Image (cartoon, rainbow, N blue to C red):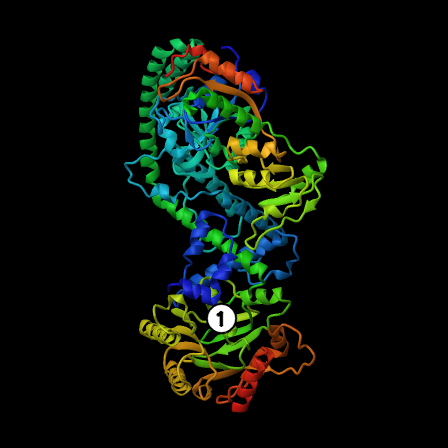
Amino acid sequence: MEQLLAPLVGDASPVTVIGLCKNAGKTTAMRRLMAELGEERLALTSVGRDGERTDLVTGTEKPDLYLKAGDLFATARAMLTLCDATLEVVDLTDVMTPLGPVAIFRTLSDGYVQLAGPSAAGQLRPLTARFMELGAQRVLIDGAAGRKSLAGAGVEGVALLCTGASLDRDMDLVVAETAHTCWLFARKAPEHPGLRAALEGAEERFALFEPDGSPLELPVDENGSPKWNKLPRRPLAVWAAGGITDPLLKTLARRGAPTTLVTQDATHVLAGRSALELFLRNGGQLAVRRELTIAAVAANPWSAYGWHFEPDKFISALKQAVDLPVVNVKEDQHGIDP
Amino acid sequence: MELTHELRENAGLQWVLNRLSPMSPFGKAAARSLRWYGPGDEAALEEELDNVSLAMELWNAGTTAPQADACGCAPVVLTQAQRKDAAAALRGVTRCLPLFHDIRGSFDRDPGAPFDLVELFEIKHFLVTLEQLVQAYAALPPMAGLSFPSLAGALVLMDPEGRRLPTFAIVNSYHNDLAPLRAEKAKLEKAIRMTQEDKRGPLLEKRRVLAVEEDKLELEVRRMLTGKLMAYKEDFLSNMETLGRLDLIVAKAKLALRYHCVRPTLSPDKSITLQGVRHPQVEEDLAQRGEQFTLLDLDLKPGCTVITGANMGGKTVSLRSTVLSLLLCQCGFFVFAQAAALPLFHRVELILADSGPGAGGLSSFGKEVHLLDQLLRETKGQFFFVALDEFARGTNPQEGAALARALVRHLGSLDCVALMTTHYDGVSDVAGAHYQVAGLVRDIQGDEGDDPRKRIARRMDYRLLPAPPGAPCPRDALRVCRLLKLDNSLMELFQADL
């Protein structure tokens, strides 16, 4: 098989496959990656439930994950009946899901499995560590789909971003949204080492700093909400622990001096493109405490809703808009799916 | 007897239980439904206390802490070397306890419904962990009444190869047809791997048929295992119960060591003797304010004993301390005192005058009368203890005092031990015994700027002193109000009226 994705993810682990929307081709990318990494002992799990034979939202057929003997995977107990590989139960995690507790299995034969892993981001890290203890060489995570549902997913290792025609009928919009997400994921930690150090310990919802990291008192009203209009009219850095929303960006854009807004990581930015553009036009900068990496963009020109884009046009438009490798994971299948 | 939520909270038992740290789900369950050792259970209670003191001695021997805490009441005498080995064994037991998962739910099933793979894994995990624990337990001096029925047969079933691996799979040896089928399937899977992706269809279909076949065989195996395991159900459940009891004993021992509790003795007659009793919750509150709890001595004979004394003199705390000691002892715990000799009651009750939100439309007076009535009805023919906090204070003083006196007389004629606080004169006249809080005895000047609570505490001698029956209640309300800095003009009117 042609090595399409494996060279792009390198030695990174875990690799989290995320989608801009449902049916963006997440599972296809996952299968492709598994096939290309066939020599490695893989460990798989998902964020919540995915990988169903039939997508519960749209009713389209979704490919199953076919594992090779010796691989590990974590799934909820109720998914057992949907797995047809010969299995060994290796461990039971303390992660509870609506589908029962998540257990860790080893495949004793090749076969199909269904993933329904932890839904909270905080539960993925210990699971990944456990996989490595159990001898996994690389962890693959079937991540969330939909940019808003990425919030707080805190992707470790690298991400593979799946995008496609299912997001919208308008190709230009799909390309722009994809570029926007890639831009967010490319945000870096603040350049000033003083500010970086000061942010390490930031726990509060909001905090105010000089550009060099010296702390400033944030003016608040009687409810404890920040009074953004009382900020000194000079360049400042603002730490925001929660989601970055449209109103916050618009308020900071209008305060009359450039702001460096620092968030935990790119997945915390919930705001739309227009608010972000307004913020940036007014001299604002967006930085992150933890940098995330998208290794590549996997594009699916076929939507689940009856329309599709011309594959070559879509790929080249993405390549122009995005400063990352772009691949069509369905290239091999001559565009006959679904 | 039922340990109601209200009783546990009011007596401070819940505070103690919150500091109990059982490590297994079975121990947690045991701590939630504590056994009540009533009259007739003396031998069982002594057995439980023996076990707790043995666990204390061994737990202590396993730490580097000074050994002065060993209570010397352990039932067996061990040499230094034996003690060291046994302490190591106890650590071995406690290392296993947190590893257990609660699998009681798995056994609560229709025997026709087979265990799934994860349940079988859990059962094997339970059996392997239990084997380790039982091995460690065997090296301990025997604890009375705690034995683990053998589940060796079940372990052989779940681990036919005897490798004690912490994993479970339906291995070929469970069914004759499994090995050939799986070999054929593996061959096919190999062929699938060698085939180009778009030409795999027919092979995958063949594989699917074999996978269904395998699933059927595995189901047969799971049915067989379920049937055989369910035959051990009673032994599984009894092992889990014993684990819970053992876990609870260790938790009780650790609690007793942490808080320097003492083993209660059963009094030969129906009287209660408490020396240096304290209430740990109040003690902790005081310690946070930099104050010290005054240890109390109480000697209660059958009939009603009355406590009088200044407001804020610790009368209610003495009631709560007494009730807590009784509850702990009758649940098989050590008690928060320097020495305690207690009889076993059918029932222990604490009646506080507060009418909280749960009073069901009753006033504070209505509620205490209702609770008392309920208690008297339910304890006909029983030996009981009741503590009453300023009974009948919520009604007019003349009738209230008469009712309190009548109750003291009435309790004197029943098979009970009772303790009542009151501000009414004349109540102690009819009581079996009378204690008085030493009271605001210390004359201190020059701390006007301090926290009023501290100022009262500084002047208050909280000790309970035996007082003659009929000794008048102290008149300290005025001084307490003054120390609490009640409004001046109000104080003037108050003083003028006295």
Between residue B334 and residue A265, name the one nearer to us. Answer: A265
In the image shown, does B390 or A58 lie closer to the viewer? A58
Report whether B329 appears left or right of A238.
left
Query: Residue at (48%, 83%) from the top-left corner?
Result: B423
Front residue of B428 and B45: B428
A179 vs B133: above or below: above
Give amino acid for label 1.
Answer: Arg
Left or right of residue B266, residue B458 in this image: right
* x and y percentages locating residue A116 in the rendered image: 42, 31
Residue drawn at the location 51% of the way across and 10% of the way down: A2
Give residue A35's position: percent from left, percent from top: 48, 16
- The subunit letter for the residue under badge 1 reads B
Identify whether A30 is placed above or below B408: above
Residue B351 picture location, percent across and down: 41, 72
Q: Residue A334, located in which quarter of the rendered image? A: top left
Q: Which residue is mark 1?
A: B320
